[in-house]
Image (cartoon, grey):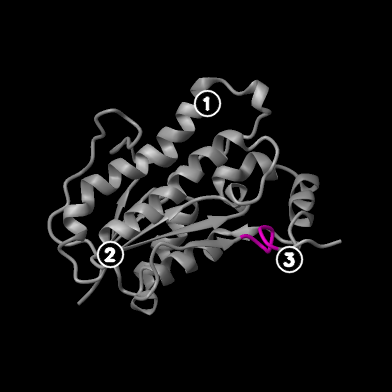
Amino acid sequence: MTKRVLIVGGNTGIGAALNEQLTSDGVTTILISRSQGDVDVTAEDPNFPEVEGAIDALIYCPGSINLKPFRGLKMSDFEHDMSVNYFGAVKTIKQYMPNLKLSDHASIVLFSTVAVQKGMPFHSSIAGAKGAVEGLTRALAAEYAPTVRINCIAPSLTDTPLAEKLLRNDKQREGAENRHPLKTIGEASDIAHMAQFLISDKAQWMTGQIIGIDGGMSSLATG
């Protein structure tokens, strides 16, 4: 039977790459995107579209990159990052958990950042929000086992529209590449391939995991 996969944020970046990979393999995808104006998962009363029947996988892709010194961050910055990254994921999972429970092999993939496990300056807001996502991943994986598997990918800087301000010229790109042991930055397809694996039958014995796809940044020291 063909799998049905719901991708929130499926029109750009990692979500778009994942959608392309899945549809090329014959998977049925359902896309929800704020860029389409049809849903706002950060609102108090989000306008989620109704989905009938079972969903085999849910991937929540929306994120933010808000890099500022702590002294320059306003409370509204922290609240926005929590709203997009953590509360958006919570609201989405609450909305579609009944659909996931109709599947025999349901799974969820969330996204964190390498900056949660590796302290980095100017990351206090986003690292805090994504740290909450990692805690959510483990707590829900324990609560919903064995019915729903829940895992999280923690990338480093990836070449997506979200990161374009950090990669706007050759000097910035070269600097970003050199900070990684593999001397490259990630591509959206690199992260999408892992998400595709995590929702597949090949990952049936994986849940509650935070998986670093980060060019070696989280665990290696070079130079």
| Along the line of sight, the residue nearer the viewer: 23 or 79 | 79
Q: Residue at x 45, y 63 (%)?
A: 209
Q: Is residue 218 magenta?
A: yes
> Count the marks: how many?
3
Circle 1 sits on which residue? 77
Mark 1 or mark 2, earlier in chain: 1
* Helix, strand or loop under label 1: helix
* Helix, strand or loop under label 2: loop
User: What amino acid does circle 1 point to?
Assistant: Asp
User: What amino acid does circle 3 point to?
Assistant: Leu
Q: Residue 72, percent across and down? A: 65, 21
**Residue 34, quarter of picture:** top left
| Along the line of sight, the residue nearer the viewer: 27 or 54 | 54
Q: Which residues are magenta?
A: 214-219
Circle 3 sits on which residue? 182
Circle 2 sits on which residue? 145
Image quarter of the N terminus: bottom left
Measure how far apart labels 1 and 2 are at the Cα level. Answer: 34 Å
User: What amino acid does circle 2 point to?
Assistant: Ala
Horizontally, is 103 left or right of 202 in the view?
left
Question: Dot 1, how many residues are within 10 Å of its Cα: few (below 14), some (14-19), or many (20+)?
Answer: some
Question: Dot 3, how many residues are within 10 Å of its Cα: few (below 14), some (14-19), or many (20+)?
Answer: some
Mark 1 or mark 3, earlier in chain: 1
Q: Residue 30, percent across and down? A: 27, 56
Horizontally, is 143 left or right of 154 in the view?
left
